[in-house]
């Protein structure tokens, strides 16, 4: 008792030279140091062994979109409109606007940006008639996308516009942050 493990090992090995044992200890220490260095690198370096890769980093866009739309179809208080979005994501835009009461509207929006892919969203807004125009203002949530926007997310985007009551032409504005 009281003796350390190395002393007991040396006694059992006899009086042979200490050089082979010292060399073995140095090799063991070097191997342990190398394993520690690899483990540290794996923990700290993105993309190293054991790290999870998503393929690409999430991107964020600050949207500032506007569009002047024309009526394609009208059924009761539902307007189906189309036109071109101009701003951050220029491209064809389709809007279905439903007047749900004298004070509110809902909408579904689809945008097909020039760079490919598509985005879809749903909006709800307050609605007010002012003379020959009606105005709406509320929020839009991104509900999905395709292509490079397949993982698109965005909530509480600003959604507003006007409806010209004589021909049901709609202008729409959307702004806010979108991640994809």
Image: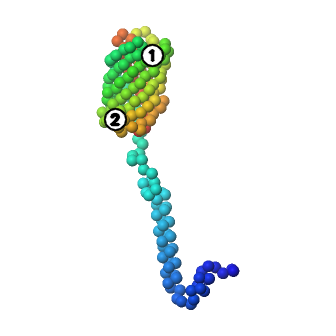
Q: Residue at horizontal 42%, vertical 36%?
A: 152
- Mark 1: few/some/many CA within 10 Å (<14, 14-19, 20+): some
Residue 47 locus on image (x, y percent): 42, 54
Q: Nearer the viewer, residue 10 or 69?
A: 10
Q: Position of residue 57 (x, y in %)?
A: 41, 45
- Residue 78 located left or right of residue 24: left
Name above or below for residue 121 compared with residue 105. below
Mark 2 neighbour class, 10 Å CA radius: few under 14, some 14 to 19, many 20 or more: some
Residue at image position (37%, 25%) is: 66
Residue occupying the point 52% across, 88% down: 17
Q: Which labelled disc corresponds to residue 99?
A: 1
Q: Mark 2 = which residue?
A: 117
- What x and y, as percent, mark residue 92? 32, 27
Q: Quick check: 50 above or below 20?
A: above
The image shows residue 173 at horizontal and vertical percentages of 40, 24
Callout 2 secondary element? loop
Relative to 93, does residue 167 appear above or below in the rendering?
above
């Amino acid at each position: 008792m009281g003796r350390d493990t190395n002393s007991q090992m040396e006694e059992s090995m006899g009086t042979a030279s200490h050089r082979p044992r010292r060399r073995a200890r140095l090799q063991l220490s070097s191997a342990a140091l190398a394993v520690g260095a690899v483990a540290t690198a794996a923990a700290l370096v993105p993309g190293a062994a054991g790290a999870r890769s998503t393929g690409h980093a999430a991107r964020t866009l600050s949207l500032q979109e506007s569009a002047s739309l024309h009526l394609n179809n009208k059924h009761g208080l539902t307007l189906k409109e189309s036109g071109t979005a101009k701003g951050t994501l220029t491209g064809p835009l389709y809007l279905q606007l439903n007047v749900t009461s004298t004070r509110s509207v809902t909408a579904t929006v689809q945008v097909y940006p020039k760079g490919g892919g598509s985005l879809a969203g749903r909006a709800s807004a307050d609605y007010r008639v002012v003379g020959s125009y009606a105005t709406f203002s509320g929020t839009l949530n991104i509900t999905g996308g395709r292509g490079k926007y397949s993982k698109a997310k965005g909530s509480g985007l600003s959604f507003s516009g006007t409806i010209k009551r004589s021909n049901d032409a709609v202008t729409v504005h959307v702004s806010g942050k979108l991640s994809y």
